[in-house]
Image (cartoon, helix red, strand yellow):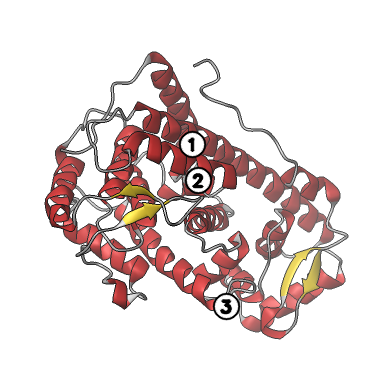
Amino acid sequence: MLYQTPALHDIDEAVLAEIDDMRNRLRLHLRASRRWEGQLRRNLTARAIAGSNTIEGYAASVSDVEDIMVGETPIEANDTVAVEIEGYRQAMTYIQRLAEAGDDFSFSKELLNALHFMMQGHHLLKRPGWWRTGPVCVTSAEDPAIAAYTAPDADSVPALTAELVAWLNTGDLGAPGLVRASMAHLNLVSIHPWSDGNGRMSRALHTLVLAREGVVAPEFSSIEEWLGRARNTYRYYDVLAEVGGPVWTPERDTLAWIRFCLRAHHQQAQAVERQVETTREVWTALDEAVERSGRPDRMLYALYPAAMGNRVRRATYQADAGLSEQQAQRDIRELVRAGWLAAKGEAQGRYYTAGADLPEDITGGARRPRPLREPYRES
């Protein structure tokens, strides 16, 4: 027996409807290809990867994750963190591809183990891609000597994962996709089938279930960035302990978990919607400024991340704009001379940020903080 999908209340249905509205608006907006979409997708994916790994103690900036994604050496992240990020990037890239798989796709134990190996293949002594053979527990954040949750015996893992895979393929198909994804997450993290990497795998499975739903690309629907924020991470562990119990007890009520996840999806959808709107506004304003200056519009690929408060690397600009190394270098030098970019660091660590002369009316709007609305405000 797995943890069971709960009955939803009117307030939950209302929150789901609001999330669906935001996702549908986003899907319609992305139907037409836009020049800035590739950079936006990469940034959102980097945010998800950074968020999920931060929960496990492998903290890296979004800029460092983007560097790793395009094959650049990160500037701040150490080798240990970089390896963890690269493993998770491989798994997330495959999940994004699976979003486009045909009707012959199905979940399987082999798929779960393959994704786990992509994430954890650099830890061969931890048997990546194989079920654990011994006991495992989640320790308390306050005291590592205290077991906050003890997973089922290793002998139970094959049967429980088989039951989960069967449910993924045929169970509760009438439930909303967001609810199914959340229950997949809860059950996998509670089974804890591997010796390490269970949290990241459960969050990745959550994203994969949504990817297969096909409403919007996984990088636009993942809640991993939201979960990686400190206050949300604490609540994440709290609600897992509240709902999952101290040991495997699948008869417990799971509504609190579903509401936690729906709140996460609602607020992440708000954040993504705002980022898409801001991206469109910033790109349009940059386009007009570049045209007035008489510079080539390819320079937008260097100016956009800087205007959004992110880092620009020469090699990344070169790839995004489809340029030769020499042309990319000339463009960046020109933007630095114009004061639109500012150079930081030396040699292989050289990068660029927004310069002092990049128009404030462009950069100001991109960095203005705005609050997120609480979806369960009336509950």
Q: Are the two marked residues, 2 and 1, in contact with CB atoms closer than 8 angstroms?
A: yes
| In the displayed structure image, the side of residue 14 where residue 104 appears, left or right | left
Residue 302 occupies quadrant: bottom right
Residue 73: mark in rendering:
3
Q: Residues within 10 Å of mark 1 (few under 14, many from 20)?
A: many
Cα distance in 3D space between marks 2 and 1? 7 Å
In terms of sequence position, does the residue under pointer 2 or pointer 3 come before the other? 3
Q: Residues within 10 Å of mark 3 (few under 14, many from 20)?
A: some
Q: Eyeballing the image, is 93 above or below 362?
A: below
**What residue sits right under mark 2 in the picture?**
227
Q: Residue at x 20, y 51 (%)?
A: 107
* Nearer to us: label 2 or label 3: 2
- Residue that label 1 marks: 264
**Looking at the image, can residue 220 be seen?**
yes
| Amino acid, disc 1 | Ala
Q: Secondary structure at mark 3?
A: loop
